[in-house]
Amino acid sequence: NHASLVKRFFNIFDAFWVLKFVHFYRDNIQSNEKLLDCVNQLLQLNAGITLKSELEQLGFMRNWDKKRGSI
């Protein structure tokens, strides 16, 4: 059932495993890129907008998340 799957998943993949994966992915698969550029790519694809600062992006994403429930 779903509840037991979620429980088992989070027993194995805790925050340390997630960080380990993120660092492996960054070092071996995906290069470091500026957050501003990556979020603007996401916003351009999904909302058709580009913002000038990370703070503007954060405000927009928080508001967007409230409207949609969760992304």
Image (cartoon, rainbow, N blue to C red):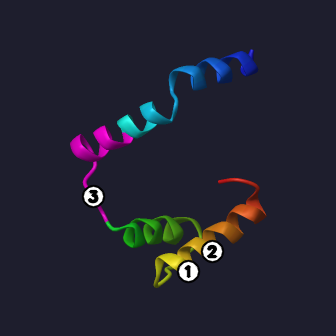
Q: Position of residue 51 (x, y in %)?
A: 50, 81
> Which residue is drawn at the image coordinates 69% and 62% (left, top)?
65
Q: Amino acid at mark 2?
A: Phe
Residue that numbered label 3 is attached to = 32
> Which residue is drawn at the image coordinates 75% and 59% (left, top)?
68
Q: Nearer the viewer, residue 47 or 36?
A: 36
Per the rendered image, the range of residues in magenta is: 22-33
Q: Quadrant of the N terminus?
A: top right
Q: Position of residue 41 (x, y in %)?
A: 44, 68
Residue contact at pointers 3 and 2, CB within 8 angstroms? no
Residue that numbered label 2 is attached to = 60
Q: Amino acid at mark 1?
A: Glu
Task: Look at the numbered disc 2 and give the secondary structure of its residue.
Answer: helix
Residue that numbered label 1 is attached to = 56
Q: Is residue 31 above or below residue 4?
A: below
Can residue 31 be found in the magenta stretch?
A: yes
Q: Residue 23 shows which numbered tag?
A: none
Mark 3 or mark 2: whose residue is earlier in sequence: 3
Locate residue 3 relative to residue 25 in the image: left or right.
right
Residue contact at pointers 2 and 1, CB within 8 angstroms? yes
Q: Quadrant of residue 4?
A: top right
Q: What separation in Å lies between label 3 and label 2 (alpha carbons)?
A: 23 Å
